[in-house]
Amino acid sequence: MDRFISRLLFLAACSSTAILALIALFIFMEGAPILFRSGFGHFLAGRTWAPLEGQFGILPFILGSLWVTAGSLLLGVPLGVACATYLAVFAPPRSALILKPAIELLAGIPSVVYGFLGVLWLAPLIRTHLGGPGLSILGASCVLAIMILPTIVSVSIDALQAVPRSYREGSLALGATEWQTTRRVVLRAARSGILAGVILGMGRAVGETMAVIMISGNATHIPGSILDSVRTLTANIAIEMGYAVGDHRRALFATGVVLFFFIMILNTAALRVARRKF
């Protein structure tokens, strides 16, 4: 019976890998032909996306994804690390028991709700006070910053709590203040875990679709500022896959290949950082 259960669990574990391999194989089979036909460099560096004219340049979408992801990290990482530091080091136990589940609850809210709130409140605020169409890189970055908070906060709290208590006690015994101990000892010792949380949050920001479609404006040109509308790689696939045929459909799968490699690089980096010792 033990041997049977062991083999059954082994098959269950292998099934996940097999499913991933099949998904990757399907994406590559569909997207590779257009990559070889138009040229990998031309596909990545092309500035024009006009499927009806046979032009499949995804550079505006790559830059859009990078702008939105960078903006969300710029806003979300300081806030997330600050929240994690307070909850792990300074917060009373009773407050931490309330605040931590409340932050983690943000991960359970559907992304379409974030997008709806962004369109309803954030976009008019940006349009009125900063200019532009409102549906912009800034709006998408603000929404994604809130969406990646649970990931960054949860992983960072675990990293901070994993720092040996003797580090903190030794620093305090030498005369350092609570903040000096936190900044120069605890945060430095937990930097690997915090960085892993940041990378995982980055992966969430890159792969987000629905909220970005609603708040980014979906313009197919290279953005010039954070107030311009933009379209990301995921948004382009989601918007056009429903009616795409022929080379247009294959180009969308090729976009998925690029996105697949991008996410794989981020996940690999996150695993390597998370496995490092303090």
Image (spheres, rainbow, N blue to C red):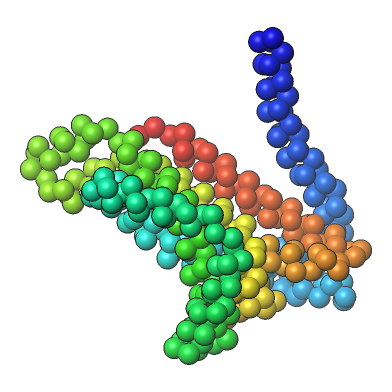
Q: Position of residue 41 (x, y in %)?
A: 74, 61
Does residue 113 appear to the left or right of 198 in the view shown?
right
Q: How many marks?
A: 0
Please give the name of the residue rendered at 52% of the width and 64% of the height, measured from the top-left corner.
144
Residue at left offset 36%, top offset 45%: 157
Q: Quadrant of the N terminus?
A: top right
Residue 240 lies, with reference to residue 124, above or below; the image says above
Residue at the (87%, 76%) spot, across then down = 53
Q: Is residue 230 visible?
A: no
Q: Is residue 240 visible?
A: yes
Between 182 and 57, the one lying in front of the other is 182
Q: Residue furthest right?
A: 246
Q: Using the rendered view, name the quadrant where residue 221 is placed.
A: bottom right
- The answer to which quarter of the image holds residue 93 is top left
Percent coordinates x, y for residue 76 in the rendering: 43, 61
Residue depicted at 74% across the width and 31% down the height: 15
Compared with 218, 58 (above or below) is above
Q: Position of residue 224 (x, y in %)?
A: 56, 80
Q: Position of residue 46 (x, y in %)?
A: 73, 70
- In the picture, which quadrant includes the C terminus? top left
